[in-house]
Amino acid sequence: MRITIITVCYNRKATIEKAIKSVLSQNYPDIEYIIVDGNSKDGTKEIIESYRDKISQFISEPDKGMYDAINKGLKLATGDVIGLMHSDDEFFDKKAISRIAARFNADSSIDGIYGDGVYVTNDTDERLVRDRIGGVFSLKKVKGGWLPLHPTVYLKKDIIDKHGLYNLDFKIASDTEFLLRYLYKYKIKMSYIDKYIVKMRMGGMSTSFKTALEVLNEDYKIYKYHGLTAVQAVFLKKSMALRQYITH
């Protein structure tokens, strides 16, 4: 089984090398690694080029934002299973992809998997900000506002080919629409791995809080877009998550 990992980036000189090394250090032997850069101007491209012989495909050109870049990567992907590694993040350990592949191999009927993740501060101490435990999947949880942590989600390529790419009508929370479409509308079969998959870095506190508010607003529109009846409950539940950005 070949697993495709896609990293998209723009002006991420400070973190891109850690993300690349994290992918290259995985002990799984059959990884296709695709990097889509938005024509960075800060030296990011030069760092990526230094690993060019270990990267399956690399393109650098202007895009319409992160989700447009992800869609470019998805169109290039040839693996049986596809997941994302954001340019600010790392895998939790070297066995993450091996565990994902093992789960798919153990049950050919599943369409996707997800796991756990942690948020850490963007400094040398990497202090824990939030521990995100996915828990066993259920459609009831999805209807109530829960979604798996996006960077832990790995889906079969044929499922993505069938149900479509990221919706560019949503600028900052298209991952919410993508997951709702797959999990709620099409009810694909998901499996939970009770292991940490990713370590995600936070930005500055004010920036993170501002971004969280913007995402919350777009999330609200997305839930209405999908016709979910529990919009107010979802909004309240997601609003409570903002405390994570205020208290740390």
Image: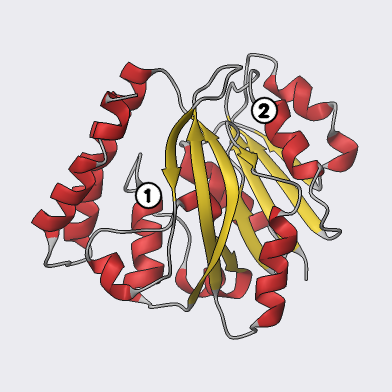
Quadrant of the drawing holding the N terminus: bottom right
Q: Does residue 31 show up?
A: yes
| Residue positioned 41% across, 69% down in the render | 182
| Residue designated by label 2 | 16
Mark 1 element type = helix
Residue 124 picture location, percent across and down: 61, 17
| Residue designated by label 1 | 174
Quadrant of the drawing holding the C terminus: top left
Identity, as a three-letter code, of the amino acid under mark 2: Ile
Q: Is residue 193 above or below residue 91?
A: below
Distance from disc 1 to disc 2, alpha carbons, whole Å, reads 22 Å
Identity, as a three-letter code, of the amino acid under mark 1: Ser
Residue 238 in the figure: left or right of residue 196? left
- The coloring applied to the image is secondary structure
Residue 81 picture location, percent across and down: 66, 66
Residue 14 in the figure: left or right of residue 115? right
Which numbered dot is residue 63? none
Residue 46 picture location, percent across and down: 77, 21
